[in-house]
Image (tube, helix red, strand yellow):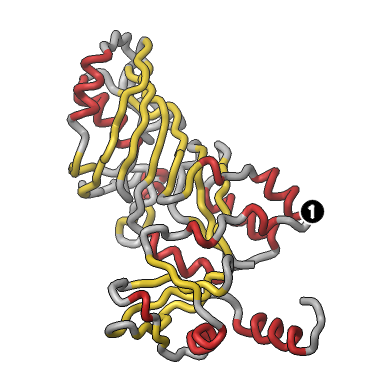
Amino acid sequence: MNGVLVVDKPAGMTSHDVVNRVRRMLGQRSVGHLGTLDPSATGVLPLVVGSFTRLAKFYTHCEKGYEGEIRFGFATDTYDADGEATTAAQEVRLERGQIEALAESFLGTVEQMPPPFSAKKIGGVPAYKLARKQREVALKAVPVEIKEFTILEVEGDWVTFRARVGSGTYMRSIAHDMGQKIGCGAHLARLGRTAVAEFGLAEAHGLEAVDLAVRQGTAEDLFVHPRKLLPEMASVTANDEAVAFIRAGRAVNLPEMSRAPLVKVFYGQRELVAIATRIAGTLFHAGMVLGNREVEEARDSTRRFGRDW
């Protein structure tokens, strides 16, 4: 079972919890995710299954989309609603123009300090583990990119927003920093992830739906169609001979791909065989071969004997 399954993560579960649950559902050890979501956050959590876990490296720096709410009036130690208040609560009267101008000041590449309760590692130890032990968390500001930060609604001390950000950006830190700039404190009250790279809520499935599909034997129907993966990368459909060369670790000639540095190689409409790298001219070598060779050999053997696979 190889593919990408997009889960609509519920609140209260860590991303690792979701991975473990799907592993048990699918009976598949090789399952990973393409970007951590905080336990209180919901939304798009793409999981890579089987040999497709190798594709994770292509999603290391992918863009992410969010919608959420920020509450002004007090800050918390975790920068979200799960933490303890670190400032006294105060009454706040926000003006939309003020908040929109503040949001605009965050656009572009900015230096951002990660939250002390985060997965950022200090000396190999996640910051949140140090923070829970009340040990000093010496984090450093890092450059992040905020591509969109749109204010959707301002009501009382609540602000609803939509954002598109680069990899490594913490919306919790943005909420905290906004509160500091206004001088009243703020924290992220709710966060939903709407997109990770090419994956959106339209492709996401609840864990109950995944469980039902597994019991009905239709789990792979929930997987994202392989042709939709890595849309920025060129693709080619290879013939039997080229696929055999690729699986044998040999270079293959792909005449129509003379300018592409990387190519997705398909066999038929759905089977993603490999990611091939151009060596020179139209000669490619598959540095990443996907699928299970033993399964493929068994399938070919079965076809030769005329039986249904």
Element type at mark 1: helix
Q: Quadrant of residue 176?
A: top left
> Which x, y percent locates residue 282?
33, 82
Q: Residue at x 58, y 39 (%)?
A: 10
Q: Quadrant of residue 77?
A: top left
Above or below residue 67? Residue 256 is: below
- The residue indicated by pointer 1 is 216
In this orientation, does residue 139 appear? Answer: yes
Above or below residue 243? Residue 215 is: above
Above or below residue 121? Residue 7 is: above
Q: Residue at x 55, y 74 (%)?
A: 267
> Which x, y percent locates residue 162?
37, 30
Q: Residue at x 45, y 39 (%)?
A: 193
Q: Residue at x 24, y 45 (%)?
A: 145
Q: Horizontal placement of 281 versus 118: left or right?
A: left
Quadrant where the image shows the N terminus = bottom right
Find the residue positioned furthest to the front: 256
Depth order, front residue of 4/300: 300
Q: Horizontal placement of 214 versus 166: left or right?
A: right
